[in-house]
Structures are given as structure tokens and as C-alpha cells.
Amino acid sequence: MARVAFLGLGVMGYPMAGHLAKAGHQVTVYNRTTAKAEKWVAEHGGAFGATPRAAVEGAEFVMSCVGNDDDLASVCRGADGAFAGMDRGAVFVDHTTVSSGITRTLAAEAAEHGVGFVDAPVSGGQAGAENGILSIMCGGTEGDYARAEPVMQAYGKTIRRLGESGAGQIAKMMNQICIAGLVQGLAEALRFGEKAGMDGKAVVEVIQGGAAGSWQMVNRHATMLDGKFDYGFAVDWMRKDLGICLRTADEIGAPLPVTALVDQFYKDVQQMGGGRWDTSSLIERLRRLS
């Protein structure tokens, strides 16, 4: 078992760190709000650090799951940052969805400190984190990945290295691009059925096993039809992720017409007061249009 630090105890990080403790790892946590770290320690044992640097002291692996590029940079850099406190040869594993640019920059800075760096964004949402069945898309050196992969097994079901530093973030962007189009298509179909007087749940029972089927259809059609949008990844975070996708697309010259359109639909949902609704709330926008 390993000595592990976990930085960031949000809806994803809290259960992920818990799985590490349950797997027998020696875990020290850090959270910007100390009360959350104290609660985690009371529930799982281990310890918490007042700063990222304090939390990572003596850790062989440091996992992070924070909010955005700036949040990640803040826990890594500076006198109280993780890099300043990590031992040479330790590995930093970042589960945040951020830009591939900040990933590559921080990986280079980590190397200057003698620290490995794996970008490892996750998919599977809050339920996947709580159940320990996340999909983890990784970038970094083969050696750093090989060392970190057994530790990530505590909360990951599908874990794969996809290339050098930044590759994990590019894969996560591809994931979010797929989801945006799928959810919009599902929302349109379900609203179309409502307007036509169809029993949407009955229709989905028929079509979900065919070519139209998807995880979104199986797991979200009923809650969408019932107007319940508190099941996971929030619109505010999806817009953050799609912004990363669109900026990267501009940089590399890749057209994302559907993604750009759905991003604006999510902006409409935010303006409706649905920033904290889950991403399936696109159907509510359609309801208010007709």
C-alpha cells in the first residue's frame, strides 16, 4: 500500500479519496475549506494538511481533483504548493478537467522538481466516483503511468494511457463533445414525443437497445421526462469543459459546429437559473420554447 495525498474534496474527489482509504492506502487530504477535510478524516481516518505542501509531505502519489486551470496551478505552485513539498520520484496525478496547455506546462514544472506528472481526467460522474467505477483517460510517460495505475484502480474501472502529457485532457474533450451532441439529440427526441402525445418512457423501452441507444438514454430519459435535474454533472461545469474544447478546436483548426451550438443552449439554461442543474436539463430549455 502507498502513502497518498488527495487535493480537492468536491463531489468527485471526496468519494475518490475515500476509495483510496478503503483500499488500504495511507491517505492525507487537503481541501480549500478545512471543514470538508475534517469531515473526511472523521469518516475515513488518515489526516489532513492545512496547505497542499503540508498534505503531500512524504507522499509517493499525489492526486488532485479541483475546479479549473487556475485552481490546479494554485495547488501545484508556490511556497505552499504541492510541487514544493513533494519528494523527488513521487508522481502527481491530476484528475481535474483542464486545458492540455496547463497540463503540459505543469508537467514540465514537475519534472524540474524531479516529480512525475500524469494527466488523468475522469468520466462517470458523481455516481461513478461514489461506486469506484470511473473511466480514466491518461497522458504522461509510460513509467509514471505504470506506477500510478495500480493506485487509480481504487476508483477506476477503465484506465488507459493514451499518449504523452496532455493526451488525457484531449481524450476528455472528445468525451465531452460526444456527450453534448447526445444529450441535445435525446432532449429533442423526448420533447418531440411529448408534443406528439407519445409515452416517452414506453418508446425508450423499445428503442434503447437499437442504434439510437446510449448511456444517456438508458440512465437519464426517465428523469428528463419527470423534469428532475439533480443527477450529476452540472451545467456550469459542462460549459467550463465545452469552453476548453472550443478554445482548443480554434487552436488546432478543428470545426466543432454542433458543440458550439449546444454550448449556447447550455448558456440559455444558465440564464434560466439552471446552472446547477445536471446536463440533461437541455430538455427544459425546449419545453420553455414550446
Image (cartoon, helix red, strand yellow):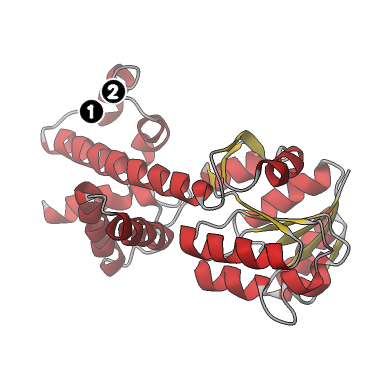
Gap in Å between the C-alphas at discs 1 and 2? 5 Å
Q: Secondary structure at mark 1?
A: loop
Query: Between 37 and 86, which is closer to the camera in this rendering?
Result: 86
On residue 202, the disc is 2
Q: Quadrant of the N terminus?
A: top right
Residues at circles 1 and 2 in contact by the CB criterion of under 8 Å: yes
Is residue 72 visible to us here? yes
Q: Secondary structure at mark 2?
A: helix
Q: Kindly identify the amino acid type of the residue bearing the numbered disc 2.
A: Ala
In the displayed structure, 124 sits above or below 83; it is above
Identified at 82% across, 43% down, the residue is 22
Query: Between 28 and 213, which is closer to the camera in this rendering?
Result: 28
In the displayed structure, 99 sits above or below 229; it is below
On residue 199, the disc is 1
Q: List x then y, in percent, for residue 112.
A: 70, 67
In the displayed structure, 210 sits above or below 201; it is above
